[in-house]
Image (tube, rainbow, N blue to C red):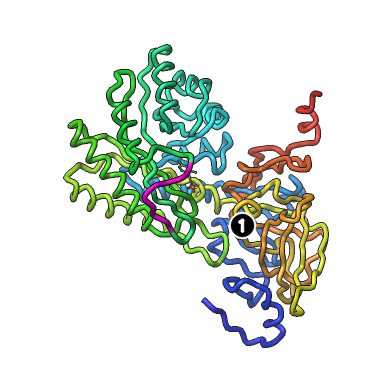
Amino acid sequence: MSHTHVAGSIHADVASAAPAWLRLPDDVNTLLPELWSKNVAKDGNGELTIGGLTVSQIADEVGTAAYVLDEDDLRQRARDYASAFDGWGVYYAGKSLLCKAVARWVTEEGLGLDVCTGGELAVALAAGVDPARIGLHGNNKSVEEITRALEVGVGRIIVDSDDEITRLIELSEQLDKHPRLMVRVTTGVEAHTHEYISTAHEDQKFGFSIAGGQAAAALRRIHDHPRLQLVGIHSHIGSQIFDADGFEVATRRTLRLHAAFAEETGVELPELDLGGGFGIAYTSQDTPSTPQQLAEALNKIIAAECATLGVAVPHLSIEPGRSISGPSAFALYTVGTVKQVLLDGGASRLYVAVDGGMSDNIRTALYAAEYSATLASRRSDAGPALSRVVGKHCEGGDILVRDEFLPSDIRPGDLIAVPGAGAYSRSMASNYNHVPRPPMVSVRDGRISTLIRRESIDDLLALDVG
Ligand SMILES: *Cc1c(COP(=O)(O)O)cnc(C)c1O
């Protein structure tokens, strides 16, 4: 873990205010390949390139801030899940990044698509996704959302409350439908990043509790109703998870419920969904598993547990979001101002302000998420400076990258790229301070396509009708 360096006291000063995990780079121009999509590299001038285009070419064409997506990389990640989880259903979690092109790409690569609002459903349908391959989530689905889902015939609705079951019964009678339903359960497992917590009961808004008996009651209520088709149990334990322990405990608890239901009713439910949450590398600290490793671990856990319980292995599914969309895009910014701030103990930090911020990536402010960054538009011969990449919003917490070593000569006009910007960046973007949201562009074989155009001040004013 600790990185020894020969350069002595200068580096010791530079690094003194850095977090322990942050490696002092030998060369500030170097990319850590595990953080970037497969068609990203630095060229002979030290400039970042993606799919044969330099970031300057992209900035000239679409401006900054922008999200830049590697189409081939995203498709490859979708394919890798489909092949590693052979025989499973793989549903891409659209909430991580959804636009018509991405919906088409993931379904072309063989995946299904999860949505959790009427808005996400509308994008999926506008992209031409077969409704039978769509799953609808959400803890508070409206009458309009359920009606739309029933009318178009989504493949499965993941039910989250008793009120929703009542609504589903009424609406499916009115519309003469027989929807396919899964029951979202809470297993008492909560996974965060490198650890998970397993508790007896759970204090959160999603799902029906297994421990409290509500999950069994919901299964029974749906099973007993002639309008409703009960397909199976659904569990999702969290996000940015790096080990299988949380999945193991959740799977065991879920399969026990599955077996108890079979015992009680004589029916082994045909399906089981284990949700998403597989972690990706935002910084050198993160060590994600491959889809192949995940599939092996989950198949083993499930085979063992089903054998113990004496039930057949149901048809399984997962719902990766971040691990497909996240690493495939970087955010591209232009540096506007650079400030050196002296810290206690004689160290200093460069505050590098860019033309975006918490409105295009809220995760650092919201969850203390960690990111990395690189000087993208040129090579630098300067040494590393402990830096913080901040935005342009009127908020002290408007931080994009809390800790990174950038070259000490970083200056206004430089381009900076932040990897891992495919997931939960555009999808969680806001118009805070009336900053228009950046475009999402994709690159493939030297060509740029705009997937979502840049928002304009006119777009914002068009909403303001008072
Ligand atoms: C958010 C979510 C996912 C996807 O999570 P990732 O961390 O992006 O993989 C999958 N399933 C459900 C039910 C979710 O809420």
Task: Point out residue 371 in the picture as x, y percentages from the top left corner.
Answer: 62, 60
Is label 1 within 8 A of ligand 1 (CB to nearest ligand atom)? no
In the rendered image of this protein, does residue 323 appear above or below residue 10? above
Q: Quadrant of residue 383?
A: bottom right
The magenta stretch is: 196-204
Residue ID at (73%, 40%): 431
Q: Is the magenta stretch mostly helix, strand or loop?
A: loop
Task: Point out residue 364 in the picture as x, y percentages from the top left corner.
Answer: 64, 55
Front-most of residues 350 and 30: 350
Question: Residue type at mark 1?
Answer: Ala
Front-most of residues 199 and 134: 199
Task: Point out residue 133 in the picture as x, y percentages from the top left corner.
Answer: 42, 31
Residue designated by label 1: 368
**Observer able to see residue 443:** no
Badge 1 density bin: few <14, some 14–19, many ≥20, Cα 10 Å: some
**Observer able to see residue 394:** yes
Q: Is residue 300 in the magenta section?
A: no
Residue ID at (77%, 50%): 393
Left or right, 335 with respect to 219, comes to: right
